[in-house]
Image (cartoon, rainbow, N blue to C red):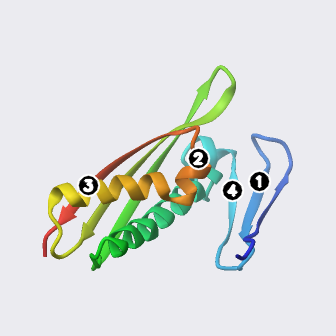
């Protein structure tokens, strides 16, 4: 299996410094700052990248789980809301809310929900974030 890489550099002080994050593949490189992380300013932040990774991982895991059960997803569209809160130990990712809309011909609601929960539990990013509360709202979309 491949080993994936990413890198980051930070220059300056916390509040007025700035940084850049880069994926090892070169598919993304972008700035981040105190403002983009804690105040909704321009640029990205580690939590946003974790959200993208989790949404992508879950979408693929759900498609694979469905395929193993004999269903083919026409599409799986997932978003993630990553909550960064200040707690006693400092800033912490306290919860992630996944929301997915999937078009899966021939599946009933109960089986759809069962496979969605299995995909959430089996997704490698979910497993890596096991100490974080992860919720899922799964919507079966009919064409």
Q: Is residue 78 left or right of residue 44?
A: left
Crowdedness near tag 4: few (<14), some (14–19) or many (≥20) residues, C-alpha within 10 Å = many
Q: Under tag 4, what secondary structure?
A: strand
User: Residue 57: image x %, image y %?
Assistant: 50, 65
Q: Is residue 106 left or right of residue 17?
A: left
User: Residue 28: image x %, image y %?
Assistant: 65, 74
Residue drawn 13% across the image and 70% down it: 142
- Residue that badge 3 annotates: 113
Which circle, 4 or 3, is nearer the viewer? 3
Mark 4 and mark 3: span between their CA atoms? 37 Å
Q: Nearer the viewer, residue 35 or 126?
A: 126
Q: Nearer the viewer, residue 96 or 129?
A: 129
Numbered mark located on residue 18 in the image: 1
Q: Nearer the viewer, residue 141 or 126?
A: 126
Decide: marks 1, 4 in contact (CB < 8 A)? yes
Q: How many marks?
A: 4
- Residue that badge 2 annotates: 129
For marks 2 and 3, the one nearer the N-term is 3
Q: Under tag 3, what secondary structure?
A: helix
Mark 2 and mark 4: span between their CA atoms? 22 Å
Crowdedness near tag 3: few (<14), some (14–19) or many (≥20) residues, C-alpha within 10 Å = some
For marks 4 and 3, the one nearer the N-term is 4
- Residue that extends furthest to the top in the rendered view of this protein: 88
- What quarter of the picture does the C terminus occupy? bottom left
Numbered mark located on residue 32 in the image: 4
Mark 1 and mark 4: span between their CA atoms? 6 Å
Mark 1 and mark 3: span between their CA atoms? 42 Å
- Give the answer, above or below, for where 127 lies relative to 22: above
For marks 1 and 3, the one nearer the N-term is 1
Q: Quadrant of residue 138?
A: bottom left
């Amino acid at each position: 299996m491949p080993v994936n890489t990413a890198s980051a550099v930070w220059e300056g002080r916390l509040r007025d410094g700035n940084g850049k994050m880069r994926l090892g593949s070169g598919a993304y490189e972008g700035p981040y700052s105190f403002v983009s992380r804690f105040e909704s300013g321009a640029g990205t932040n580690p939590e946003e990248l974790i959200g993208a990774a989790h949404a992508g991982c879950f979408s693929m895991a759900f498609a694979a789980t469905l395929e193993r059960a004999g269903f083919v997803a026409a599409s799986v569209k997932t978003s993630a809301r990553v909550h960064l809160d200040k707690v006693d130990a400092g800033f912490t990712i306290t919860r992630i809310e996944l929301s997915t809309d999937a078009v899966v011909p021939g599946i009933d609601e109960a089986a759809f929900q069962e496979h969605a929960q299995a995909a959430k539990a089996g997704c490698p990013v979910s497993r890596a974030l096991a100490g974080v509360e992860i919720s899922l709202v799964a919507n079966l979309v009919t064409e």
